[in-house]
């Protein structure tokens, strides 16, 4: 069945998915705003602070006790990047009423609790309280600092920053350490008001029945004073730049090599072809990169590519010994060039298509994946189901795959490697 | 419903209505099928009771145990994907199935998820796992790939903090050894050793097949009948490890490029016979107890958070396997010693003050909800059925255990675990960058 977005207020869309297959109900509310250095920190703290500073349960341990009583219901706070936009996300997940030991009505209570968190925080003197603000500031700063702990993710992030310098895409979704450090309860309260006024909002509710939550959310958004949604950034204006190569050194054993490719303006709009090209190049364990760089040359444990359609960015990354990094890079470029020349078999296309089709058709069996799928489409005029995205793959021709590969260009090569003299060749 | 000629037993969970079918195939392989109405995908897992800890074992008629290099179970997992004339990934490429495998402490599992061509994918899974092919050249090639996997693990603070903790807790038990082994240990692996392990552990009597999702028992049985090879029964027994009750050392540190210290504070759980698992009731009681001690509604969690000693990375867990069990509290902290000492104080306080009926009830409700929610996804359902089978726990038993667990069961764990001589603090400290 084709899901339909119902407008609840200007720029607020509600997608209700009635489904009795799952044991849980899930309500996801995403507030989308352009990702900008000057506002990123004050927006990023909001989902965490709203969860902690709830009007109904201003004491966090009382809130958690209530959630435990509601059979371990969870309120999840997160910030994600969608292209050059920031999505502030709060999600309530609870077991469905059918499974409550005493048949309590849980799902409606959880949905209502989430609504109240967004609109009715526990203010003191008209703003978020000092202690909670300071606590969530500390947690957010520590979250940003800890990004270096995962060397693969860190390296990918550094490559994106170099590749997309000057764009919203390069701004950290959590803001900066200094930006978060400078926040005051007044700043954050203003950011909350601004977000409710200007965010585009995407709400996805998955449950056995949708109940009254859509009406209650509609009333709350209608009551938000001066609501005027800001347009989101759908495509950055880009000009071709020279390739930049950056090597950074840390106390590590394995080098992380990341190649960053960018599409320009409308190049990259052929999403189905881009998806297939990426799957064929490095998106599966039967792709060209896996077969050649890992299996034939045994240079690495992983070598894969991923395409972010919202940022129009393709990254290829691999963990290698530094002494083999040049060889790995040459081999990666060789495989990319082969795709640009159309030097791949019809079997390669078919394998990439069946693999992607399987990925898409599995999405509807996972509540959180389905919510992410629809929130990701907030930038699109029309929504498509995962099954429709799978169907679109059938029309993609070899020429379109080749054109997709040619429409991106390599502009950043990043390597995180061991400090000079340490671990080299170990 | 399964046909009358098969011997399927239906097992249903009363709170959720979740059902699965079980049979033992004539080849000796136990099979579980959990059809999920309305689901598009299916998830199959073919696992063997053979993991990284199985470096010392007895086979039928042995009086001396066999000893193997660390990391060999994981190496074997990699190598099984390659047959003489093809590799499993190329075969799956034709069905679209998303395939993978993993090796844990006590099992190796081969799996796929698919939305189409289920029978073909299941045939590939059963066929390649039953067709070992190892040569000097393919073993050498894999040593290059796995060396990089080991290097990657060496740079992962979250992995190091865990394995360092296990090294500080366990004197002899091989749970302390990294699952992938070391560059030196995998260099000792030969095709002959791999065939030896394969023939010992990849026997249908030592394995299990679990499928859930858009699937019927008949579909699974038809492929199993065609593909499974008969095998003589041979037994393999894990050697009991004479592991002392006490830890090796109470503290272990390593420097790495991290922003702030990472810690795991762990208590070793003493398993008297050196090889059994916890029961479903004990596992649920452990979950309830951890929620009471350090859950987000607990005094401890909120005090540590308000004091700036923990952040959103804080978590806790209990995990067990044959002959080992660990209570674990971890995260990032500027002062991990203060966190460890607060945890220890809180456990002592609960022993004195007791656990209130309210605190128990709400933690029990949370555990019940978690168990119910875990039945949503086909991958979780299949993996849990496999893990429970290997541990001797009935299907879905955690849901019933969570619904009916008593406060006494929780208090009993509180009284018998968490001795200070069983605790250790593992730290990853910033090396400066």
Image (spheres, helix red, strand yellow):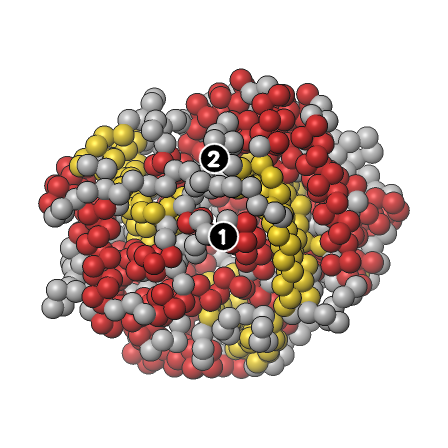
Does A360 sit above or below residue A396?
below
**Front-lying residue, A348 or B214:** A348
Quarter of image, res A418: bottom right
> Is residue B285 shown to the viewer in this render?
no
Quadrant position of the N terminus of chain A in the picture: top left
Quarter of image, res B161: bottom right
**Helix, strand, or loop for circle 1?**
loop
Q: Which mark is residue A265?
A: 2
The disc numbered 1 marks a residue on which chain? A
Residue at (74% x, 59% y) in the render: A322
**Helix, strand, or loop for circle 2?**
loop
Q: Which mark is residue B298?
A: none
Residue B329 percent location from the top left of the image: 46, 69
Residue at (51% x, 74% y) in the render: B261
Q: Is residue B256 left or right of residue B402?
A: right
Does B192 sit above or below residue B296?
above
Residue A247 percent location from the top left of the image: 65, 60
* Disc on the earlier residue, 1 or 2: 1
Q: Is residue A291 left or right of residue B325?
A: right
Q: Is residue B140 left or right of residue B412?
A: right
**Front-lying residue, B387 or A205:** A205
> Is residue A185 shown to the viewer in this render?
yes
Mark 1: few/some/many CA within 10 Å (<14, 14-19, 20+): few
Q: Which mark is residue A165?
A: 1
Residue at (46% x, 26% y) in the render: A389
Callout count: 2
Residue at (48% x, 20% y) in the render: A391
Does A398 sit above or below residue B426?
above
Quadrant position of the C terminus of chain A in the picture: bottom right
């Amino acid at each position: 069945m084709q899901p339909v977005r119902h407008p609840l207020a200007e720029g607020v869309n509600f997608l209700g998915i009635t489904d009795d297959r799952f044991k849980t109900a899930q309500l996801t509310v995403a507030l989308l705003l352009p990702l900008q250095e000057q506002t990123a920190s004050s927006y990023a703290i909001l989902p965490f602070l709203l969860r902690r500073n709830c009007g109904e349960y201003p004491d966090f341990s009382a809130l958690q006790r209530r959630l435990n009583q509601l059979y371990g219901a969870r309120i999840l706070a997160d910030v994600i990047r969608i292209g050059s936009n920031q999505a502030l996300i709060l999600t309530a997940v609870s077991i469905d009423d059918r499974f409550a030991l005493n048949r309590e009505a849980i799902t409606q209570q959880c949905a209502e609790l989430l609504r109240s968190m967004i609109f009715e925080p526990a203010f003191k003197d008209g703003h978020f309280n000092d202690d909670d603000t300071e606590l969530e500031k500390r947690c957010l700063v520590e979250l940003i600092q800890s990004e270096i702990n995962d060397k693969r993710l860190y390296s990918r992030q550094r490559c994106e920053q170099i590749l997309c310098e000057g764009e919203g895409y390069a701004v950290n979704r959590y803001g900066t350490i200094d930006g978060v450090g400078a926040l005051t309860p007044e700043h954050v309260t203003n950011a909350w008001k601004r977000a409710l006024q200007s965010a585009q909002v995407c709400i996805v509710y998955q449950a056995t029945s949708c109940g009254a939550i859509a009406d209650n959310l509609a009333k709350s958004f209608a009551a938000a004073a001066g609501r005027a949604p800001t347009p989101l950034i759908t495509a950055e204006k880009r000009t071709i730049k020279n390739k930049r190569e950056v090597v950074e050194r840390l106390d590590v054993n394995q080098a992380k090599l990341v190649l960053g490719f960018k599409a320009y303006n409308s190049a990259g709009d052929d999403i189905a072809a881009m998806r297939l090209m990426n799957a064929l190049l490095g998106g599966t364990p039967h792709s060209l990169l896996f077969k050649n760089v890992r299996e034939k040359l045994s240079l690495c444990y992983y070598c894969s590519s991923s395409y972010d359609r919202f940022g129009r960015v393709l990254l290829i990354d691999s963990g290698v010994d530094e002494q083999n990094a040049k060889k790995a890079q040459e081999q990666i470029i060789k495989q990319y060039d082969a795709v640009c020349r159309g030097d791949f078999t019809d079997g390669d296309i078919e394998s990439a298509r069946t693999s992607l089709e399987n990925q898409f058709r599995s999405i509807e069996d996972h509540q959180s994946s389905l919510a992410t799928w629809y929130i990701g489409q907030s930038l699109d005029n029309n929504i498509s189901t995962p099954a429709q995205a799978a169907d679109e793959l059938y029309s993609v021709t070899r020429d379109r795959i080749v054109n997709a590969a040619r429409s991106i260009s390599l502009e950043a090569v990043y390597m995180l490697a061991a400090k000079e003299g340490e671990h080299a060749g170990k | 419903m399964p046909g009358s000629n098969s011997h399927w037993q239906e097992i249903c969970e009363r709170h959720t209505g979740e059902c699965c079918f079980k049979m033992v195939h004539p080849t000796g392989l136990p099979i579980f099928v959990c059809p999920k109405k309305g689901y598009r995908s299916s998830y199959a897992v073919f696992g063997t009771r053979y993991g990284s800890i199985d470096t010392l074992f007895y086979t039928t008629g042995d009086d001396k145990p066999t000893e193997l290099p660390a990391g060999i179970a994981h190496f074997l997992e990699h190598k099984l994907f390659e047959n003489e004339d093809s590799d499993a990934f190329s075969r799956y490429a034709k069905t679209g199935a998303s395939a993978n495998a993993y090796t844990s402490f006590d099992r190796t599992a081969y799996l796929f998820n698919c939305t189409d061509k289920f029978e073909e994918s299941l045939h590939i899974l059963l066929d390649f796992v039953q067709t070992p092919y190892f040569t000097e050249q393919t073993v050498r090639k894999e040593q290059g790939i796995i060396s990089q996997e080991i290097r990657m693990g060496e740079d992962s603070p979250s992995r190091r903090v865990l394995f360092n903790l296990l090294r500080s807790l366990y004197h002899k038990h091989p749970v302390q050894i990294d699952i992938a082994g070391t560059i030196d240990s995998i260099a000792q692996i030969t095709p002959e050793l791999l065939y030896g392990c394969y023939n010992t552990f990849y026997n249908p009597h030592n394995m299990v097949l679990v499928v859930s999702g858009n699937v019927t028992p008949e579909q699974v049985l038809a492929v199993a009948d065609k593909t499974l090879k008969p095998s003589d029964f041979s037994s393999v027994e894990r050697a009991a490890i004479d592991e002392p009750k006490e830890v090796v050392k109470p503290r272990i540190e390593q420097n790495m490029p991290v922003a702030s210290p990472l810690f795991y504070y762990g208590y070793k759980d003493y398993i008297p016979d050196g090889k059994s698992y916890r029961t479903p009731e004990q596992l649920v009681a452990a979950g309830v107890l951890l929620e009471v001690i350090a859950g987000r509604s607990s005094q401890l969690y909120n005090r540590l958070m308000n004091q700036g000693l923990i952040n959103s990375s804080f978590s806790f867990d209990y995990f067990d396997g044959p002959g080992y069990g660990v209570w674990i509290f971890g995260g990032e902290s500027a002062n991990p010693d203060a966190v460890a000492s607060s945890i220890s104080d809180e456990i002592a306080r609960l022993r004195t003050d007791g656990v209130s009926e309210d605190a128990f009830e709400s933690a029990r409700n949370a555990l019940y909800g978690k168990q119910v929610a875990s039945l949503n996804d086909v991958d979780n359902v299949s993996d849990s059925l496999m893990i429970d089978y290997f541990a001797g726990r009935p299907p879905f038993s955690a849901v019933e255990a969570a619904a009916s667990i008593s406060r006494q069961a929780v208090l009993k764990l509180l009284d018998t675990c968490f001795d200070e001589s069983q605790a250790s603090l593992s730290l990853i400290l910033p090396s400066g960058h």
